[in-house]
Image (cartoon, helix red, strand yellow):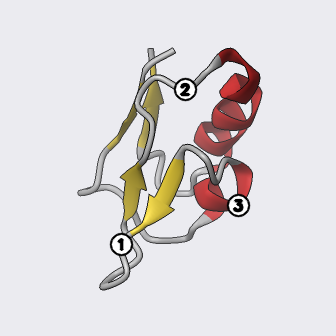
Amino acid sequence: MRVHADQEKCCGAGSCVLSAPDVFDQRDADGIVVVLDTEPPAELHEAVREAAAICPAAAISLS
C-alpha cells in the first residue's frame, strides 16, 4: 500500500490522525495533513483505509 495526501484538498479535520496516528500527523501552523509513512506495514492497512474513507475532504488516496 502506498499513501498520498493532497494538502491542497485537506481541510484540517484531523480524522486521519485519530484513525491512524502512526501514518498521519498535522502541521502545527494550520492543521494540514502530513503523511509520516507513505508505505505503512500491513498491520496498519485497515486503519489507513478507514482514514481515507472518513476524510471529509477526500484528500487521502491509496494505491
Q: Earlier in the sequence, mark 3 or mark 1?
A: 3
Q: Earlier in the sequence, mark 2 or mark 3?
A: 3
Q: What is the three-letter code of the residue carrying label 2? A: Pro
Q: Quadrant of residue 45?
A: top right
Q: Earlier in the sequence, mark 1 or mark 2?
A: 1
How many numbered markers are drawn?
3
Using a 10 Å C-alpha cutoff, classify the residue at mark 1 as few (fewer than 14 neighbours), some (14 to 19) or many (20 or more).
Answer: few
Closer to the camera in the image, 9 or 48: 48
Residue that badge 3 annotates: 18
Q: Position of residue 47 (x, y in %)?
A: 73, 36
Residue that badge 2 annotates: 40
Q: Position of residue 21 (x, y in %)?
A: 64, 54
Separation of marks 3 and 1 at Cα, in angstroms = 14 Å
Is 27 on the left or on the right of 1, as rendered? left
Is 26 on the left or on the right of 27, as rendered? right
**Rendered residue at 70%/29% (across/down):** 44
Using a 10 Å C-alpha cutoff, classify the residue at mark 2 as few (fewer than 14 neighbours), some (14 to 19) or many (20 or more).
Answer: some
Q: Which element carries disc 2, helix, strand or loop? A: loop
Query: Which labelled disc corresponds to residue 27?
Result: 1
Q: Which element carries disc 1, helix, strand or loop? A: loop
**Rendered residue at 55%/70% (across/down):** 13
**Rendered residue at 61%/59% (across/down):** 17
Using a 10 Å C-alpha cutoff, classify the residue at mark 3 as few (fewer than 14 neighbours), some (14 to 19) or many (20 or more).
Answer: few
